[in-house]
Image: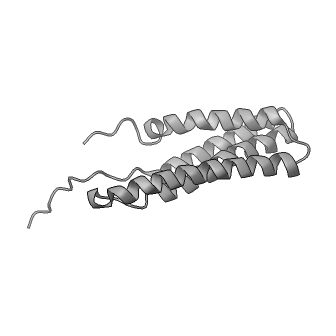
Amino acid sequence: MAKAKHQGINRPPVLRWLTFQTGIVILMGLAFLLKSTVASYSAFLGGFIFLLPNAYFARKAFRHAGARSAKQIVSSFYQGEAGKLILCAVLFTMAFKWIQPLDVAALFLTFAIMLVTNWLTPLIASGGPQRS
């Protein structure tokens, strides 16, 4: 008996993407170690302020699949994005309030690089554009 060909939309390899992004954060933290230890841990902090909310969004947004779940998918995306923004704000507030000394440039530069990396990760970590 032949297997039926799957016609649905595949879920993105989110775990692979998050692993790739974690590697970029580690590289950024090690690169800033050349400047100072404060810059290094500030870079790690900026990267993880990006990664933790992004992981929350991925978990929330990609838990439903299929056309019958369309309303749930849209709702999950909105909830995930709202939670992501709130988590970013809370984590930045905690960093500025509790972490001293802090290299603000390293923190924001790493966060900004992670934003750009997030846009490029599907192309880089998945081996190029996916076509069926």
Question: In the rendered image of this protein, does residue 107 appear above or below residue 13?
Answer: above
Say which of 24 and 113 sits in front. Answer: 113
Given the current orientation, which residue lies at the most extreme left position? 1
Count of numbered badges drawn on the protein: 0
Given the current orientation, which residue lies at the most extreme right position? 101
Quarter of the image containing the N terminus?
bottom left
Say which of 69 and 32 sits in front. Answer: 69
Residue in view at x 83 percent, y 37 percent = 39
Question: In the rendered image of this protein, does residue 39 appear above or below residue 68?
Answer: above
Residue 114 relative to residue 103: left or right: left
In the rendering, at what x and y percent does residue 67 appear?
27, 56
Residue in view at x 47 percent, y 41 percent = 125
Display coloring: one colour
Say which of 114 and 79 sits in front. Answer: 79
Residue in view at x 62 percent, y 38 percent = 114
Residue 114 relative to residue 97: left or right: left
Q: Quadrant of residue 101?
A: top right
In the rendering, at what x and y percent does residue 53 appear?
62, 51
